[in-house]
Amino acid sequence: MSISVRDIRKNFGRFTALDGVSLEIPDGQLVALLGPSGSGKTTLLRIIAGLEFPDCGTVQFDGNDITDQTARERRVGFVFQHYALFRHMTVFENIAFGLRVRPRRFRPSSEQVRAKVNELLRLIQLQNQAQRYPSQLSGGQRQRVALARALAVEPSVLLLDEPFGSLDAKVRMELRRWLRQLHDEVHITSVFVTHDQDEALEVSDRVAVMNEGRIEQVGRPDEVYDHPVSPFVYNFLGNVNLFHGRVDNDRAYIHESATGNLVFVRPHLLDIDRQPGSPNSFRARTRHINSAGALVKIEAVTDWGAPVHIEMSQQRLRELQLVKDEVIFVIPKEVAVFRNNRPS
Amino acid sequence: MEPAFVRWLLIAVAVIFLGSFLLLPLGVVFGTAFEKGLRFYFASLREPDALAAIKLTLLAAGIAVPMNLVFGVAAAWVIGKFDFVGKSMLITLIDLPFSVSPVVSGLIYVLLFGLQGFLGPWLIAHNIRIIFAVPGIVLATIFVTFPFVARELLPMVQAQGNDEEEAALTLGSSGWQTFFRVTLPNVKWALVYGVILCNARAMGEFGAVSVVSGHIRGLTNTMPLHIEILYNDYQFVAAFAVASLLALLALLTLVVKSIVEWQAKQQLAEQATASEETRQ
């Protein structure tokens, strides 16, 4: 089912959570709402779910206006950040809940319920935990139960609010791959909220980057990563160096004074030379070299005191034979320049 | 660690205090009640006025407790789950019976429904008796006991937030289904405890009921009022026999309370050890 959100505004008292948001989500896609806390992403998700209602604007499912429908009528699957499992029910009863509360005419028989729940328990690999209570499960297991519970009612869309937010790094990684696999099997239109750019870029078909109640950019993960439309998006997606500079003949020259041009360079798009050979290079001094891991991370400081982060391969480090506290010349290989918050 | 003598001193103080102010009076109640033997004890309870008082007390509690149960659950839900104007005012109002003397509560009803009261003439014209009759006693009992259930539930409801209710809603559950399947089971122990306290107070209430009752033997006397009358008539043994019933009720309340608390603790401990196991 496709989702279409148009011109949504939402205030909480004096705080503007959403300031005219429009978003199209095609059928079957997995879309990430990415942004810092307070950017309005959770509010947007809750409005799509019908748990919150917009001050103005419309929400459509498959072209039908459902703005005034309640969460109950919309048939969405919602996964809460803190799981919101029913604590007095077993895992089995939690998953069966949505089937058991159906109006009598549509309520499946207890055999059908059991078959459905067992199928979902297999899907989330918790067949042996059916009679346990939520408090007896680990965080990752609880989140999978929450997902199975949402899927049990065969929702038209699946909405996930920071689904992996309260899990530790390793479980997080496993679960997001698992979610991607699940989506590829089930193909249900899904929207998930996250503040973690890696998560958004790895899992989703499309990313909507949000800031201060607005959507800054929507696109495929590689699009938004490689061609950010605003300094905010550039800053928010991945590590980045921020400099001032000027542009001459399509070449960016980085220097100290501010001219209104902001120059962004990803750490892996900076090279190092020992001689001031290149016309657009600038001088810096290495401060720290971290060579643990696949990439070497170098921290340096420019002559005017700005920090520079550089990433390079282990091989390149060996060629350069860099050590701490020596003078280097930094050459930007590819930069993005913004003038007055617009790309130039 | 405090020196041994300090510990023993403090324990002794606590035991002596409890003994002289709680156990001793309790012993006196039962001792005096059985002073003239079992036969006299049961005769005092089977006496028509005593039976009428017991029935009336059961009736008043039987009406007041369910009504306060419904009110308390509704109030706790509204206050715990929603934000609205006048919320703190409502909380203050719920606490009102705690802060007002029961005698004053009774007087309010006399002033409202009594002969010279605000609604008195209208009630007489329609031949409705509230003061010096059973309805007044029930009303007074409801008034003095209505904070108990709400007060016990409120912290629980507030602590649990809205997440589970919202989850139920997205799963297609109706308001009532959500209430009975999600909200209520989560607060059941607090609810049981609130009902026990409410019931104990409803049966034991003296001041407010005394003002509105009129002390008509066999008609408008509750157990506490009946005990007072017997006592004033120098029928000490009979008075203490009826009093022993109320004391028994108090003991029963304590037992049920302990069971409820033990149950709740047991549940928590089970879940804690179980989650310990899953981690290993």
Image (spheres, coloured by chain):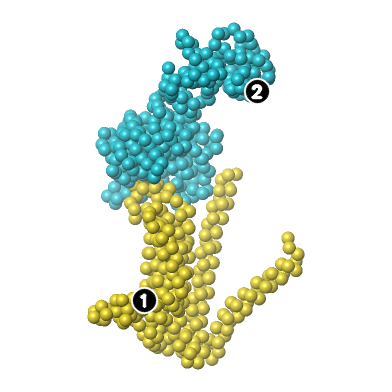
Chain colours: A cyan, B yellow
Give the percent coordinates (x, y) of residue B200: 47, 73
Residue A231: mark in rendering = none
Front in this rendered view, residue A283 or B129? A283
Q: Can I make out residue A298 in this image?
A: no
Residue A109 percent coordinates (x, y): 33, 49
**The C terminus of chain A appears in which quarter of the rendering?**
top left
The amino acid type found where label 1 is placed reads Tyr
Q: What element carries label 2?
A: strand
Asked whether A8 or B177 is in front, the reply is A8
Q: In which image quadrant can residue A124 be found?
A: top left
- Chain for mark 1? B
Along the viewing direction, whichever of A100 and A30 lies nearer the viewer: A30
Quadrant location of the N terminus of chain A in the rendered image: top left
Identified at 49% across, 76% down, the residue is B249
Which label was assigned to residue B109?
A: 1
Q: Name the spot of residue B78 as percent of width and height, x first.
A: 39, 57
Look at the picture and state if B235 lies above or below A148.
Answer: below
How far apart in space, not on screen, are marks 2 and 1 (Cα)? 82 Å
Q: Are marks 2 and 1 on the same chain?
A: no
Q: Which residue lies furthest to the left in this view?
A: B125
- B27 to the left or right of A69: right
Q: What residue type is labelled 2?
A: His
**Residue ID for mark 2:** A288
- Tell me if I can see residue B43 in this picture: yes
Closer to the eye: label 2 or 1: 1
Residue at image point 49% right, 50% down: A133
Decide: is B140 above or below A289: below
Quadrant of the rendered image containing residue B130: bottom left
Horizontal placement of A104 versus B265: left or right?
A: left
